Image: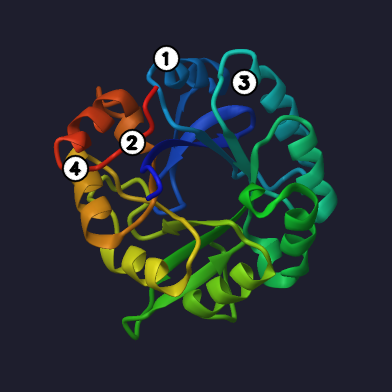
Amino acid sequence: MLKRRIIPVQLLLDGRLVKTVRFGEWRDVGDPVKSSAVYNSQYADELIFLNIDRKGGSVKPLADLLHAVSEVCFMPLCVGGGVRSFDDAAYLIQNGADKVVINTAAYCDPHILSRVAERFGSQAVVVGIDARLGADGGYVALSNCGRDIAAVPVEEHMRICEAAGAGEFLIQSVDRDGTMEGFDLPLLRLACSAGKVPVIGCGGSGQYNHLKEAFLETGVNALACGSLFNFSDSNPLRAKAFLSNYGLQFKVV
């Protein structure tokens, strides 16, 4: 059985770390390199960096950040935001990324996933899916940093991406983002039932019990947390110690 993972997720805007609420208003929460060094000392299983700045058209700032973070951080690095092509993904991997998050481009051309998987392995391909609850009670997939509604349902998109080579999914609840009210458990259950590859749940972590509920009630393989670590004295090491009391197994460090 795969070990569970606790993953700090760090949003980047103009070279700074920020934390959003429902993909809208945001607060500055620090320096990405210093923050990564702290997470390294707290035995995070990996780090996710997502660039939410859409003013530029290059992934070079992400690559530059990878070089700096690699000096202070010795864990897998997963990066995304603005990855529009195979060349973008390859550039990031060649500059230190272990995994690349592909979101909007996967709706336009799933073949990108196949090319990255064929060149670097499916474990390097993480498909990001941002979703919110629709008026009919179903979930709507969003692209372009939550600005556009995707034409394909969440479950169908997952099946298409998995067939194309996705090795993992990052499922983000737009409704719960930054609220610290708990994960969207029905969304995570839907995602876990729709695919066969690991699922990372994201959006809503506010206390350790939220992590426990998501792990025990949905079957997710990992949970990505932002506000929990940014706005409380919580950290990955304490989170894993708490969760271990409920039979959840994590990588030994």
* Residue hosting label 2: 250
Sooner in the amino-acid sequence: mark 4 or mark 3: 3
Kind of residue indicated by mark 3 = Val
Report the mark closest to the observer, 3 or 1: 1
Kind of residue indicated by mark 2 = Phe
Q: Residue at x 47, y 56 (%)?
A: 198
Sooner in the amino-acid sequence: mark 3 or mark 1: 1
Sooner in the amino-acid sequence: mark 1 or mark 2: 1
* Residue hosting label 4: 247
Distance Cα–Cα, label 4 vs label 3: 33 Å
Q: Answer few, some or many: residues within 10 Å of disc 4's Cα (few below 14, many 20 plus, some between 14 and 19).
A: few
Residue 145 badge: none
Helix, strand or loop at label 4? It is loop
Kind of residue indicated by mark 1 = Ser
* Residue hosting label 1: 41
Sooner in the amino-acid sequence: mark 3 or mark 2: 3
Residue 173 in the image, given as x and y percentages of width and height? 39, 59
Sooner in the amino-acid sequence: mark 1 or mark 4: 1
